Image (tube, grey):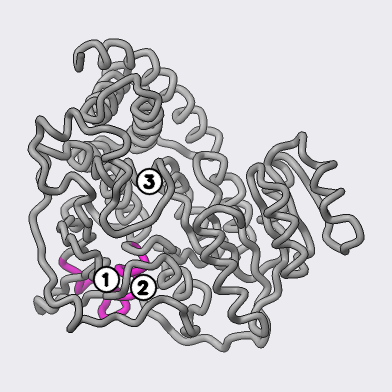
Amino acid sequence: MSAVPLRNNKAAASAVRAVTVLGATGSIGDSTMDLLRASRDRYQVEALTANTNVLGLATLAKEFGARFAAVADPDRLTELKDALAGTRTECGAGESAIIEAAARPADWVMAAVSGAAGLKPALAAVDRGATVALANKECLVCAGDFFMQRAAKAGACILPADSEHNALFQALGSGNREELVRVIITASGGPFRTWASADIEQATLAQALKHPNWSMGQKITIDSASMMNKGLEVIEAYYLFALTPEEIDVLVHPQSIIHGMVEFSDRSVVAQLGAPDMRTPIAHCLGWPDRIVGPAAKLDLARIGQLTFEEPDFGRFPGLRLAYDALRTGRGATTVYNAANEVAVAAFIAGKIRFGAIARLVEATMEAWVRSGNLAPLTSADDAIAVDHDARNKAATLLPQIALKAS
């Protein structure tokens, strides 16, 4: 049973909704706080967290009257307390404090802590049956099976905050699960959409960071250039909506106006459209099951003029193919896929490997993992974190030979 509600059955909205934002000072957090700022009468901030940005966290806690603020760095507690001196905001630091923030009694939680560090806090919110707007890929890519099982068991509502999955969530409301034929996740194609394989192989960091449509962090922008991000989204959709790999397609759509589509048995295809602005899917999650006023630009299709589509090229962008391979392998393979990609991207940023070697390192790590016989079902956060750790070590071990082959 999916913890994602596939139909928007209306529920009575409370006058004031208590919210918590995990990762309040990151890019998703910024967009969320911007929306909260525009609807102060509807929301009360329960807790806010940040990784190391104490000043930014304290500023937001004061602005919104947060009841609790936590920084992930355990050595920054005194600094946070000093920054919030004279306020009624309680303070915490370290992993346990971030988990405490998620466990506090907020109706709605934005889970935007990046990386494996976001898994346990998101589970803390899930286990108390909260509505969780999920913007952390690792919760599903690394631990999708038991994460969604825990959510269903606790009666938690998982709302996808990524633009593509939120689009699918909205479109899925047009039919029933048994009527679904496939979902279609769109991809911009990134900066290398029209490049030849040889040119992609030699792409520089500056070139990889020139995304044509979206303004995002460094890691996700590089993932977009390699289409690894689309592979991660395929994996997320698999777990979020209880799909099979065969029910998930990817379509390159350079304008980034259609974010996702769903095809039903009568061959109707329902799409969600919007200007490329992360505040749109976040606003949908924040208001759900109602809608709130969003600040994104009005969609002007006449000005845009045309929407175009292309099949993804698995040859030039093998990272997308590897995601399907990981899903079909199962038993921790998607965790390995994600961990190896993070090691590879870090190596590319550091100038240790070429851009084209990112996918080769991921594939080599996955193959070594399968050969080692380490595949096993993941049944806890600790299982997922252990596989993530081991896969990173394996990728780091393989890195020199991958770099040598590319030289």
Q: Give me the residue at 10% from left, 66% from top.
A: 308
Residue 1 in view, yes or no:
no
Q: In which quarter of the image is the C terminus?
A: top left
Q: Name the residue under label 2.
A: 6
Query: Dot 1 lies on which element?
Result: helix
Q: Residues within 10 Å of mark 1 (few under 14, many from 20)?
A: some
Where residue 63 sits: x, y (%)? 73, 68
Q: Distance between the residues labelled 2 and 3?
A: 27 Å
Where residue 298 sits: x, y (%)? 34, 82
Q: Name the residue under label 1.
A: 177
Q: Check disc 2 and give the amino acid type.
A: Leu
Where residue 204 sits: x, y (%)? 26, 32
Q: Nearer the viewer, residue 331 or 31?
A: 31
Residue span colored magenta: 165-181
Q: Say whether residue 166 is magenta.
A: yes
- Sooner in the amino-acid sequence: mark 2 or mark 3: 2
- Sooner in the amino-acid sequence: mark 1 or mark 3: 1
Q: Mark 3 points at which residue?
A: 220
